[in-house]
Amino acid sequence: MFWDKVSGMYDLFETLYNGKVYAQLGKDVAEWIEPEDTALECACGTGEITGQIAPLCRKVIATDYSLGMLRQAKRKCRKYSNVKIRRADMTNLKCRDNAADKVVAGNVIHLLEDPRLAIRELERVCKPGGNVIIPTYINIERKGRVKLFVKAFQWLGAEFRRQFDYESYQELKEGSKISIAGEKK
């Protein structure tokens, strides 16, 4: 699997590709987290967001489909006793309805064949009054080096199913209870 192969260098790639945005993402998501929250993070990757929200909440269940990414997340988050690492498919989560106060899926929605299927599943596991937080890259509006990195990742085997501009991302959000990190609560 592509994500298993790149898991060891993913953080470096993200730092080069999206430096400031990558560093800020976890901070923006963390603004939504409260001390008594149980957070479910889908597609946790290397645990970058996990590590930023773990100190702020009661419990984090960090999931990903890639075993390589989960190994990186486990290594990065081993100092947090409230983090559980699990393998999961975010379009078919094996957990009960209303299981989490906050459900996070950062920088993954553009990789999915059917983003709305994933959104419905994330909403299913989110408690009433909770938040589904799905930040993603706005790629269509970006040019130059960023577009070159996207092409390189695709050449290596990444499948970017969709690219968003601000308007198309807002359309995806319509009719759901999605919160976007960085937006006002």
Image (spheres, helix red, strand yellow):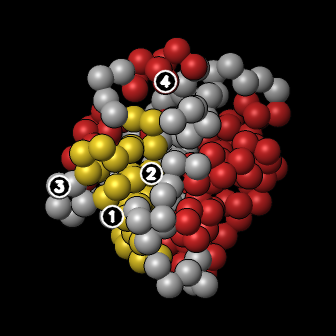
Tell me the residue that label 2 is attached to. Answer: 104
Mark 4 is on which residue type?
Tyr
Is 174 located above or below residue 178 in the figure?
Answer: above
* Mark 4 surroundings within 10 Å by alpha-carbon count, few (fewer than 14), some (14 through 19), many (20 or more): some
Q: Which of 159 and 99 lies nearest the eye of the viewer?
A: 99
Residue that appears at 41% across and 18% down: 171
Mark whose residue sits in front, 3 or 1 = 3
Residue 55 placement (x, y as % from top left): 58, 71
Of badges 1 and 4, nearer the viewer stands 4
Q: Position of residue 151 (x, y in %)?
A: 68, 36
Cα distance between the residues tagged 3 and 4: 26 Å
The local crowd at label 1, few if under 14, some if 14 to 19, many if 20 or more residues have their Cα within 10 Å, is some
Give the mark nearer the N terminus: 1 vs 4: 1
Q: Which residue is mark 4?
A: 169
In x, y percent, where is residue 177?
Answer: 34, 34
Which residue in the protein does label 3 denote? 97
Real-space Cα separation, disc 2 to disc 4, in angstroms: 16 Å
Q: Looking at the image, which residue is at 54% across and 27% down?
A: 163
Residue 88: assigned label:
1
* Placement of 15 over or under 83, stated as above or below: above
Kindly tell me whether residue 181 is visible in this rendering: yes
Circle 2: is it few (<14), some (14-19), or many (20+) Cα within 10 Å? many
Horizontal placement of 123 versus 61: left or right? left
* Residue type pointed to by label 3: Asp
Tell me the quarter of the picture where residue 73 sits.
bottom right
Picture quarter containing residue 139?
A: top right
* N-terminal label among 2 and 3: 3
Which amino acid does the dot numbered 1 rest on?
Answer: Ala
